[in-house]
Amino acid sequence: MFKNQIVAITGASGGIGRGIAEMFVKNGATVAISDLQKPSQTASEIGATAFACDVSDEASVKHFIADAELQLGPIDIYVSNAGVGSGNGRYVAGASNESWEQAWQVNVMGSVYAARALMPNWVKQGSGRFVITASAAGLLNQIGSASYSATKHAAVSLAESIAIEHGMDGVKSHCICPQYVRSNMTKGMEMAEGSQDGLLEPKDVA
């Protein structure tokens, strides 16, 4: 299905990112996975190529894209999957400025940095697919984490902006908005693990 397609995925050591990477590999794509620490073990297990990337740092995102394209070829599909979440504290705006800034940098700017690097070539060639893992919190709300909800809403808006402004250029935009998924982020999270709908598995999201 994705033969001869080059796919790059952030936050892919485990959880949704790994599930997506495995799906693409099984369907014939050449896959580059990244995480804060180079996810070499995951890459070896699933048949991908590993890179280190801190999505909150523009230079790191640019290096990931450039290195992946140098080794594998021009990226056809980019999955901006890395994400972070933290609680409010006692009040809805009670989380620290640092946690709000981290949520903004990872959940929003990580996608901005990637789109900024990829869009010129994609528009020029008339093709490319940008995928953002935005969570159901981007459509609804994650009770107890205003920073997560607000930044995931922004991520959905960015995906919409790409579709609106570059759809006619041949660039496709996709937004993944699952409810609670079994991952490190939901591990030990009572609201997630006790959800009446249960936890989705990463492979099902993929």
Image (cartoon, helix red, strand yellow):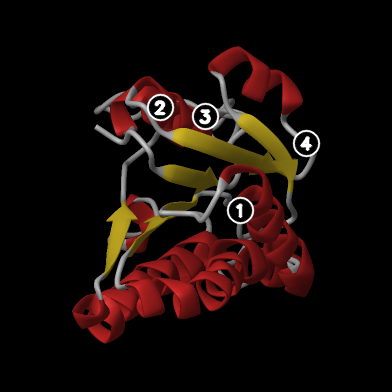
Q: Callout 4, which amino acid?
A: Lys
Binning the other alpha carbons within 10 Å of mark 3 as few (below 14), some (14 to 19) or many (20 upward) gives many
User: Which of label 2 and label 4 is nearer to you?
Assistant: 4
Instruction: Say which label, 2 or 1, has the lower sequence index.
Output: 1
Q: Callout 1, which amino acid?
A: Glu
Q: Quadrant of the N terminus?
A: top left
Residue assigned mark 1: 69
Query: Real-space Cα distance between discs 4 and 1?
Result: 17 Å
Q: Callout 3, which amino acid?
A: Arg
Residue 115: percent from the left, percent from the top?
Answer: 50, 72
The residue depicted at 69 percent of the width and 55 percent of the height is 64
Residue assigned mark 4: 38
> Quick check: marks 2 and 3 in contact, CB under 8 Å?
yes
Instruction: Say which label, 2 or 3, has the lower sequence index.
Output: 3
Residue 46: percent from the left, percent from the top?
Answer: 55, 18
> Quick check: marks 3 and 4 in contact, CB under 8 Å?
no
What number is the disc on residue 202?
2
The residue depicted at 31 percent of the width and 43 percent of the height is 178
